[in-house]
Amino acid sequence: MSKVLGFSGGDDFCSGGSIYANPKEASFFLPLGPQVDVYFPPRKRSRVNAPFVFDGEWFEQKQKTSIEALPDECLFEIFRRLPAGEDRSACACVSKRWLMLLSSICKDEICAMKNTSAENIEKDGYDVEFGGEGYLSRSLEGKKATDVRLAAIAVGTASRGGLGKLSIRGSNMCRGVTSLGLRAVAHGCPSLKSFSLWNVSTVGDEGLIEIANGCHQLEKLDLCKCPAVTDKALAAIAKNCQNLTELSLESCPNVGNEGLRAIGKFCPNLRSVTIKDCTGVSDQGIAGLFSTSLVLTKVKLQALSVSDLSLAVIGHYGKSVTDLVLNCLPNVSEKGFWVMGNGSGLKKLKSLTVASCRGVTDIGLEAVGKGCPNLKIAHLHKCAFLSDNGLISFAKAASSLESLRLEECHRITQFGFFGVLFNCGAKLKSISLVRCYGIKDLNLVLPTISPCESLRSLTICNCPGFGNASLSVLGKLCPKLQHVELSGLDGVTDAGVLPLLESSEAGLVKVNLSGCTNVTDKVVSSLANLHGWTLENLNLDGCRNISDASLMAIAENCALLCDLDVSKCSITDAGIAALAHAQQINLQILSLSGCALVSDRSLPALRKLGRTLLGLNIQHCNAINSGTVDMLVELLWRCDILS
């Protein structure tokens, strides 16, 4: 028999007897709220006729004997014989006591209904087997996260495919989630495969141990800001949920090395691990995890006090790792990256992200490049000690590199940037520079070298030193570009952008010139004439020198354009009308935010464009009044309008 007497305390539950002061109130349904999963179809309200006995001048009502007078043991025996579906849900609606008793019944305690007819199964419309395949997903946030709701979910989903994914974020301040609610989930949802618990300080080891004991099919576990959870709970998960494939731990200060060792030892299918800001985790935990895990492919370590030893372990044991993220590891030095690269274990690594690690130096990064022959994607963020020489050496060593992103690497200059293009010309498809303030525009003379014909995507974002001279060089060096983003470059003018557009042979598909305040209609006209047959996405946000002439060129030449952003440009009603009269325009997204010269007179043009529009942004268009906006909302009923 289930431990039905294990419930204790709390305002939400009764340990025995009726929860109502007046016994007649026990027949009322408990208002659990509109999103509770208990299945109970609407019925007609029954009329209650209480018998009266006439005694002189007074009426006395006879008091009926209530089922609430039965002890929990008797109710338990009744409930476990109920068929799944409507009957269980109906009983769960009677009172909190009944709900919690029903939620305490495990699958193996249910009496099998051998004579259940096909007619009853068809009537309920659900599989009557307790539990299921885990098709359903539920999410509780804030005030909705209570033990009562969890119990209702456990009872209500059992006959409707079974609960497969549960997410709890935050908790009710007065009656929050406790181990009692998780016990109900563990008993009623054996098919649970994914469990996420965020910012719930009231749940500790006891609740997670209940999940471990009842949900053996668990595959994904995500714990964030759970200070009461310790290694004890993690060890229970490891021993009982050996199908675990994904584990994420964030800001759990009491989870440490012992828990990670248990995960590595008992979870042979573990493929993805994220550990962030867990002060109890050190080198011993990382070593215990990696030395026993054989199929671990995705690893993210962030804000941990690990040292060079952890990187050495990863470099030696990470034979299956394909994606590695190392973020904010202040105790890791150059030696750690050098040893990791020379560990000969990262042969399958394809994606590497390193951020805010002082150990990323020229020597360390070159060693990583040599030790990862299949590396295709590299993202280097805030690598303060990385210089041009180290970047070029890395590019030479990482012969399979296809995508490189440099963000806030201020020691990188034009020499390092173009050095990468010279040395990765065979396979490099994408390169990005974001907020790299070491870039200064130089009049470089290119040596005689074959162009980088593999490069398809170029992003230069908020690098104020990048100017016309560098763009002219890029135009000659990268003739096969399809995606170009030059955003936030005040120093770039038509003289720099035009050579890049004219040298592109493949046909540009996506162009972003947002924040390039000195670009004029000449660039857009050239872009429309040269690449109108391929252009699909154009962003001119903040280009204040762009006027109606650009929209006329777009309307005439860009038949495939589906996304256009001309926010804060010098666009008027005439430009919108030109777009609307284009014969082949097929715009789906149009942004006119901050276009002060667009007025109510654009209503007919916008209505015509609305035949294909799915999104329209007219925020801060002060010349368009609210009445016009209301008409647009009514007319363009398929279009999402921001106003």
Image (spheres, grey):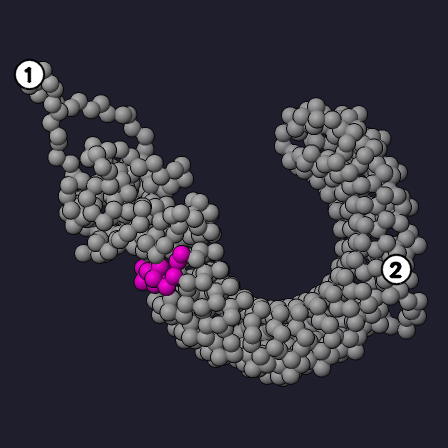
Q: Position of residue 369 (x, y in %)?
A: 68, 77
Residue at the image position 76 percent from the left and 28 percent from the top? 624
Residue 311 drawn at (x, y percent) = 58, 79
Report whether 215 appears left or right of 50. right
Q: Which residues are magenta?
A: 202-215
Q: Does 110 appear above or below 558?
A: below
Q: Would you call the spot at circle 1 few (<14 residues within 10 Å), some (14-19), or many (20 or more)?
A: few
In screen coordinates, is 445 left or right of 323?
Answer: right
Q: SS class of the residue under badge 1?
A: loop
Q: Is residue 602 visible?
A: no
Give the residue type at disc 2: Gly
Inspect the image, locate mark 1, and give the three-letter code of the amino acid beneath it: Gly
- State whether residue 496 is above or below residue 615: below
Q: Which residue is mark 1?
A: 56
The numbered disc on residue 467 is: 2
Q: Quadrant for the C terminus, please.
A: top right
- Classify residue 178 by image quadrant: bottom left
Which residue is at a point 80% across and 36% down the rendered structure image?
A: 595
Q: Is residue 219 visible?
A: yes
Is residue 398 shown left or right of residue 305?
Answer: right
Name, please, the residue furthest toward the top. 57
Residue drawn 38% across the image and 66% down it: 233
What is the chief secondary structure element of the magenta stretch? helix
Marks 2 and 1: which is nearer the front? 1
